[in-house]
């Protein structure tokens, strides 16, 4: 039975006898075929030019244009038309010529209808099979092209090895990834591109014979690049990390037995993943701001160093480093500025350490330094001194000049501790010992420090409650204007005292450094200013309008961004004239962020507040900054006054300070005056304003008020402590 699609095919009937054409057309129509008739060869050519025919029944002997010529035309034009010749000529030569012209078959006239129909059906069936075969071939070709495109475009290396482990195929990716041309690898053994350290592991996966789920997956190796320049992402050596999947290839059937013929595999570049893993690992063990090892990595290295030192009977040192007054930088200049400072501090610290040392950021503004394999504590002392000296140089951040000091505690193994935790604790304790004694120095740990550290922690805890429980009180020490016959109280210095519930009355030297380190100095300093203003109001109500109170300011207070606004707010709150207050600062404070502090002091001076330099001569004295500051008073340090009784060389310094103050038209106060001899000497050199035990000890506000009243009643009498 002829298929429906063949029934719709159009068949061209060609003969020079119309009656034959009519008979053929009727026969084929009854069989379901569509036909077109052409009388003679020329008519057939016209029909072939107008439309396509799947089949042509062609008579050979026709006048004018024979069947042979029609077949020549079909061949010349490469028409897709199957030709069945129908002819009464049955000679061998005639049939041979027809078949040479690629006719499908030869039907002898007169024909048998069944035979003709069967021939037509066979011809159409052959056409259909040929067409299907062509379609399959085209699909295979497209599939192969797609496969090759996908393989060559793959981000992975796709390869095949023969049974000896030599390359038989590799895609284009190998050029980009490893730098080899494909032709270079053909016939070469896989081991030539494997990192030598991974040869044993590679042997198992590249020679894989297992298949499907039994085959290995995601095996990590390293391959060697041909040319490092071909792979910018290569690591330190000319290798690249990869992940490989492989399976065995077999040929044959179950009857004859399958034979192993090679391996098929896929190689994936995992450089990015390894880099990400390395980044994650770095972030886990390093501080991202400074790029230094963090606390976890430092402890790990210290543990290893302690174990090594124990086996080798060696020493090592641990330093705990803390920036002095860093919290003030963050509070006054902002955290971004503080982060920049930490970065430049890190760079300076790096320049001071040895190649085998470990510098780490322990947290905040704290750093730790591991010095392995030292011969004695003197080795660590050299490093500590080097760091202290380097920090004397200013830091420059965003065109700002900033001075930062550092406190260093040192613990040495094994005498100060035999474990990582003990060494860190001891160095931390030694660092806080430095903090409590003026900062900007280094100190080796000693066992006595543990008790001091515990006392310090206890005081800090109690200090946090002191403000709430109103345990602070201001004491006042008179500042006296003296001549040969009398003395007059002109001012008083406010000195804070702490009524500790256990330790009794504590002076500022015993807790102010703790307050600065803990940040409590800011609320305490604000309380001092407010209490001084309240005292001025009380004295004013008692009739003493012209007495001035001097207030000691911490560097942390002055450097805080809201310091001036807070100071002025308190003055306005109590309605105090600014000239009744004097702010005492140290020379060292001026050297910290000089430009900013000078601006703040100018603002205070504009509100009438007097500015005094306390302990003058003991810091970084410089005439240049004295000229920039709105200074009214210099206070000669007590160490120079004490030297007067000994007739020491320091007396010359007193003379120089007095002369300088007179030349700069500044007021002078000599502090720490305790003897008549000192008073007489100061009067001789021209310093008439004095303060010290000779004139009165620090005392509560009520007693100071009585002393003011007594001085007012007896203005001609010299006031002294006796």
Image: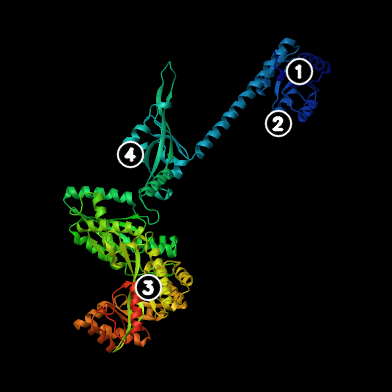
- Name the spot of residue 664 as percent of width and height, x first: 37, 86
- Seen in the picture, residue 487 relative to 450 is either above or below; the reply is below
Task: Point out the image quarter for the C terminus.
Answer: bottom left
Between the C-alphas of marks 4 and 1, the distance is 73 Å
- First of labels 3, 2 by sequence position: 2
Label 1 secondary element: loop
Between the C-alphas of marks 1 and 2, the distance is 25 Å
- First of labels 1, 2 by sequence position: 1
Residue with the mark numbered 2: 77
Q: Which mark is residue 482?
A: none
Between the C-alphas of marks 3 and 1, the distance is 122 Å
Label 3 secondary element: strand
Residue 198, by quadrant, is top left
Q: Nearer the viewer, residue 494 or 244?
A: 494
Residue with the mark numbered 1: 33
- First of labels 2, 4 by sequence position: 2
Asked if residue 500 shows in the view, the reply is: yes
Q: Nearer the viewer, residue 179 or 416?
A: 416
Horizontally, is 38 left or right of 257 in the view?
Answer: right
- Name the spot of residue 640 as percent of width and height, x first: 25, 79
- First of labels 3, 4 by sequence position: 4
- First of labels 3, 1 by sequence position: 1
- Name the spot of residue 62 as percent of width and height, x first: 78, 21
- Seen in the picture, residue 626 relative to 443 is either above or below; the reply is below
Residue at image position (37%, 49%) is 282
Residue with the mark numbered 4: 198
Horizontally, is 393 left or right of 273 in the view?
Answer: left
Find the residue positioned furthest to the front. 713
Local crowd size for mark 2, using a 10 Å CA cut-off: few (<14), some (14–19), many (≥20): few
Residue with the mark numbered 3: 551
């Amino acid at each position: 039975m002829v298929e429906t699609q063949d029934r719709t095919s159009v068949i061209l009937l060609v003969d020079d006898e119309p009656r034959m054409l009519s008979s053929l057309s009727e026969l084929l129509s009854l069989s379901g075929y569509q036909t077109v008739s052409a009388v003679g060869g020329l008519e057939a050519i016209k029909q072939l030019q107008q439309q396509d025919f799947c089949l042509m029944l062609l008579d050979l002997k026709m006048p004018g244009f024979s069947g042979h010529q029609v077949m020549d035309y079909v061949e010349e034009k490469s028409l897709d038309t199957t030709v069945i010749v129908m002819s009464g000529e049955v000679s061998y030569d005639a049939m041979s010529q027809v078949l040479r012209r690629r006719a499908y078959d030869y039907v002898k006239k007169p024909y048998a209808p069944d035979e003709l129909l069967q021939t037509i059906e066979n011809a159409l069936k052959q056409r259909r099979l040929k067409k299907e075969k062509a379609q399959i071939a085209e699909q295979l070709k497209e599939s192969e092209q797609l496969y090759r495109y996908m393989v060559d475009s793959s981000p992975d290396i796709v390869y095949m090895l023969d049974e000896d482990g030599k390359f038989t195929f590799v895609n284009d990716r190998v050029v980009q990834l490893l730098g080899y041309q494909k032709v270079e690898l053909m016939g070469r053994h896989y081991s030539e591109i494997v990192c030598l350290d991974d040869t044993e592991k590679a042997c198992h996966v590249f020679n894989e014979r297992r298949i499907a789920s039994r085959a290995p997956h995601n095996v990590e190796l390293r391959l060697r690049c041909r040319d490092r320049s071909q792979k910018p992402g290569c690591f330190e050596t000319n290798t690249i990390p990869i992940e490989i999947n492989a399976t065995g290839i077999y040929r044959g059937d179950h009857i004859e037995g399958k034979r192993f013929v090679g391996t098929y595999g896929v190689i994936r570049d995992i450089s990015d993943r390894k880099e990400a893993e390395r980044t994650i690992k770095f972030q886990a063990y390093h501080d991202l701001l400074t790029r230094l090892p963090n606390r976890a990595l430092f402890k790990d290295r210290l543990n290893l160093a302690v174990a090594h030192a124990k086996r080798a009977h060696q020493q090592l040192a641990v330093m705990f480093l803390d920036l002095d007054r860093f919290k003030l930088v963050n509070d006054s200049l902002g955290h971004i500025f503080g982060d920049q400072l930490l970065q430049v501090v890190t760079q300076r610290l790096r320049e001071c350490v040895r190649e085998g040392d470990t510098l780490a950021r322990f947290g905040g503004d704290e750093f730790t330094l591991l010095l392995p394999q030292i011969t004695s504590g003197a080795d660590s002392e050299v490093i500590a001194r080097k760091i202290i000296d380097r920090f004397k140089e200013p830091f420059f951040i965003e065109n700002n000049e900033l001075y930062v000091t550092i406190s260093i505690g040192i613990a040495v193994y094994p005498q100060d501790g035999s474990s990582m935790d003990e060494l860190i604790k001891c160095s931390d304790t030694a660092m806080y010992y430095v903090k409590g004694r003026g900062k900007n120095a280094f100190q080796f740990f000693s066992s006595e420090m543990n008790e001091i550290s515990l006392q310090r922690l206890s005081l800090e805890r109690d200090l946090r409650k002191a403000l709430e429980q109103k345990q602070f009180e201001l004491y006042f020490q008179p500042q006296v204007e003296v001549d040969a016959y009398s003395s007059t109280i002109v001012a008083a210095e406010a000195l804070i005292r702490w009524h500790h519930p256990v330790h009794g009355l504590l002076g500022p030297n015993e807790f102010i450094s703790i307050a600065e380190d803990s940040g409590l100095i800011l609320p305490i300093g604000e309380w001092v200013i407010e209490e001084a203003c309240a005292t001025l109001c009380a004295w004013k109500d008692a009739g003493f309008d012209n007495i001035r109170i001097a207030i000691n300011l911490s560097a942390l207070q002055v450097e805080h961004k809201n310091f001036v606004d807070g100071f002025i707010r308190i003055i306005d709150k109590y309605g105090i004239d600014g000239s009744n207050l004097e702010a005492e600062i140290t020379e060292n404070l001026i050297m910290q962020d000089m430009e900013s502090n000078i601006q703040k002091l100018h603002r205070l001076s504009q509100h009438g507040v007097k500015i005094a330099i306390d302990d003058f001569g003991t810091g970084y004295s410089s005439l240049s900054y004295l000229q920039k500051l709105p200074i009214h008073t210099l206070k000669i340090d007590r160490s120079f006054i004490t030297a007067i009784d000994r007739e020491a060389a320091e007396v010359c310094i007193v003379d120089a300070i007095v002369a300088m103050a007179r030349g700069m038209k500044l007021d002078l106060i000599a502090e720490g005056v305790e003897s008549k001899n000192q008073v007489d000497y100061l009067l001789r050199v021209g310093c008439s304003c004095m303060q010290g035990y000779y004139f009165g000890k620090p005392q509560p506000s009520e007693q100071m008020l009585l002393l003011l009243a007594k001085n007012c009643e007896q203005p001609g009498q010299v006031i002294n402590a006796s």
